[in-house]
Amino acid sequence: AAREHIMRKWSLVIHDVALEIIRKNNSSLDANIEITKFQDIIAIVNNHPELEKILLLGFSAKNSAAQTFLKYIAEEQLEAEFPENFRLKSEQSFTVFMNDRKMECVILNSTSSASSITMLKLVNQFRKFL
């Protein structure tokens, strides 16, 4: 209930990059997930003109949100612009073009309980980028 309240208050939507996965050892860790099919992110963006920004939570694991989204961009042959010296790390951003839309994509730390990032740091990141 609290999560839903926050999402409504800030006009947020959470969506996974993966549509279908294979989970190894019944684990939710990114490292134990193999993505077999992506969501149609282009259709989601096209169907929601109110979307302004894509936040990618997590970047270090092979199947993290950021790394998976970059695979999706490559697979769909989408145009993207990266700043000079771009690296996969927290608080980095880049732009992706989907049809006539220009979407800012921001990489943030994972909200997973397995992450060592403090709640205060996560809250401050969300405040900065929302």
Image: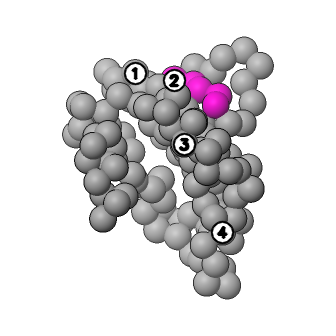
In the image, residue 94 lies in the stretch drawn in magenta: yes
Of badges 3 and 1, the one in the foreground is 3
Please provide the residue range marked out in magenta. 91-95
Secondary structure under the numbered disc 4 in the rendered image: loop
Q: Does 7 appear above or below 35?
A: above
- Look at label 1 and name its amino acid: Lys
Q: Which mark is residue 102?
A: 1
Secondary structure under the numbered disc 3 in the rendered image: helix
Gap in Å between the C-alphas at discs 4 and 1? Answer: 31 Å
Left of 46 or right of it: where is 65?
right
Q: Does 37 appear above or below 53?
A: below
Q: Does 43 appear above or below 130?
A: below
- Look at label 3 and name its amino acid: Val
- Look at label 2 and name its amino acid: Thr
Q: Which mark is residue 123?
A: 3
Residue contact at pointers 1 and 2, CB within 8 angstroms: yes
Task: Pick whichever, 12 or 67, lies toward us.
Answer: 12
**Residue beneath label 2, please?**
95
Of badges 3 and 2, the one in the foreground is 3
Gap in Å between the C-alphas at discs 3 and 1? Answer: 26 Å
